[in-house]
Amino acid sequence: MDQIQHDIILVGGGAAGLRAAIAALEETPRLSVALVSKVYPMRSHTVSAEGGSAAVVRDYDSLELHARDTVKGSDFLADQDAVEAFVAEAPGEIVQIEHWGCPWSRDPDGRVSVRAFGGMSVKRTVYASDKTGFHMLHALFQTSLKYDQLTRDDEFFVTSLLGEDGACRGVVAWDIRGGRFICLVARTVILCTGGAGRIFPFTTNGAIKTGDGMALAYRAGVPLKDMEFVQYHPTGLPGTGILITEASRGEGGYLLNAKGDRFMSEYAPNKKELAARDVISRAIVDEMQAGRTFDGPYGNYVHLDLRHLGEAAINKKLPFVRELTRNYVGLDPVVDPIPVRPVVHYMMGGVHTDMSGSTPLSGLYAAGEVACVTINGANRLGSNSLTECLVFGARAGAAAARYAAEASQPRTESLLQLAAQEERRVREKFLERKGGKERIVDLREEMHRVMESGAGIYRNETDLKETCRVLRDLREKFDHLASIDKEQVFNTELTAVLELDFMIDVAETVAQSALRRHESRGSHARTDYKERDDSRHPNHFLVTHTPEGPRFDDLPVCITRFQPEKRSY
Ligand SMILES: Cc1cc2nc3c(=O)[nH]c(=O)nc-3n(C[C@H](O)[C@H](O)[C@H](O)COP(=O)(O)OP(=O)(O)OC[C@H]3O[C@@H](n4cnc5c(N)ncnc54)[C@H](O)[C@@H]3O)c2cc1C
């Protein structure tokens, strides 16, 4: 097996990974940094972000208000020291990325435009039409090209972390195109591998969002945090789950039930369609249960109405929404309401880090959606997460660079042996397997079914226990997989099975954490524990992998200025 040595290995080429790479090289230019990604960086999920990126850029706004909105949105589970750092550094990042080439939309007077977003008290979401993620990722990617010290390993799939003397010292990767394993050693590793929406059947998330980094860290003994909190976005297209951005409501679109009522007035009298996402998603499910929604080939749905905005505004501010609706449901939002339903969108939980992205495992950092700092708590506000990738990507990159500058050289010989063991594991378990009867697709569908039925928008003890039981059975069935494609080059069946293996671990942490949280908070709505319980649960749950099963520890929430209060919109 080939071994390649760098100072820093960055896993993931989305917004967080590229921002971290740039920050690391700005901090210490002599370092050698490798960016490892299972897809070309420009195909990372960040590219599909539509609505915008939040920061205080107007005089009427304030850092305190952005922090207050974020903490309230999180249902008071966000760590407030992290939120305060986040809002303070956000405006600088928005200016910086424009200098790198991100074409923010502008008002006629030349100022950067801002739009309304759910749970934000004032307009503070900057955007580039409704293709914000595409433009941000482009600006970061092209900026990264100027650093000679940055090498890219595109289409390398990381299967495990490498450790020595209690520190993370590299990764083992499967070179998808070359059909071989590589041992990549480094003084430090940063995980920027994104979320895990694909553990659910119906999601806005691209097919690559399979929680790999969460599982990699978990298997290496690093705790995951807040895993029970899964965000549903209220407006996905039925059938495909394709996202209709919140910007469509920010620009004035509203939701109608089958009776033609603007039902959000009942659930959130003040903010209506601009309440937080958990509130609107639950309202749609309640309308479904009351029989006031439309019935379609892909289940029940409501209408998102943009017609009153007019063709000119839709073309200027929401062209992608028009394009997606025309192409995927054959309707034109200029004249037709759009059918929508809630769909899994974002993981609030992830790898436990501090504010510099550092994890409890020495030498391992994490940033972006894979990480849980946490500014999102029990519910993320839309448009905070692109900014989170910038702020905490930059912090993690700089901190890892400082760590790498001090850390000793990894012992390459012993790491190579560990990598050889990992190669044997994957070959024996998957590539060279003969004969079981279980098919990947059946196991994945089974996981999807129980995650939706037990760990979806509404949860209860009986269903969660059943979900946990089925996930444990799936783990056993996984040991009896049918043989898979033996091809070495572009073996997509191998990557699919590796991803499913990661997803089952992540799904288990979600369901087990949800079972343990006896209250309703943010996106976690228990029908058997309907209220938020601040007396017993002002805590995060940390879940750590042990041979006997997941172990839980409590971690108190950091409260600086904003005392928990009733959350209404
Ligand atoms: C449709 C959609 C629209 C959104 N719109 C908005 C919005 O308007 N505003 C907002 O703030 N947020 C939005 N979000 C959320 C936001 O886009 C994401 O949270 C954010 O882009 C995540 O960035 P990231 O860098 O953490 O990960 P990603 O962009 O997902 O990148 C992950 C990277 O990790 C790599 N990777 C993963 N596993 C492995 C492995 N095993 N080996 C090697 N490489 C690996 C991938 O190749 C990829 O490069 C949206 C999300 C979706 C799905």
Image (tube, rainbow, N blue to C red):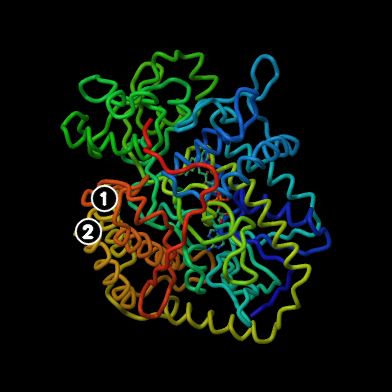
Q: Residue at x 35, y 31 (%)?
A: 329
Q: Residue 111 location in percent, x, y?
A: 68, 21
Residue 157 spot, x, y in % from top left: 55, 65
The local secondary structure at tag 1 comes to strand
Q: Quadrant of the C terminus?
A: top left
Q: Which mark is residue 485?
A: none
Q: Which mark is residue 461?
A: 2
Local crowd size for mark 2, using a 10 Å CA cut-off: few (<14), some (14–19), many (≥20): some
Which quadrant of the rendered structure holds the N terminus? bottom right
Give the Cα distance between marks 1 and 2: 8 Å
Residue at x 31%, y 48% (from the top left corner) = 520
Element assignment for label 2: helix
Q: Residue at x 73, y 69 (%)?
A: 6
**What is the number of callouts on the image?**
2
- Whether residues under marks 1 and 2 lie with C-beta atoms below 8 angstroms apart, the answer is yes
> In the image, residue 260 lies at what x, y percent?
24, 19
The disc labelled 2 sits on which kind of residue?
Glu
The answer to which of marks 1 and 2 sits earlier in the sequence is 2
Q: In this view of the protein, which residue sits in the foreground, 450 or 231?
A: 231
Taking the spot 55% from the left edge, 39% from the top edge, the residue there is: 67
- 490 to 284, vertically: above or below: below
Q: Mark 1 belongs to which amino acid?
A: Arg
Q: Is residue 539 above or below residue 544?
A: above
The residue under label 1 is 526
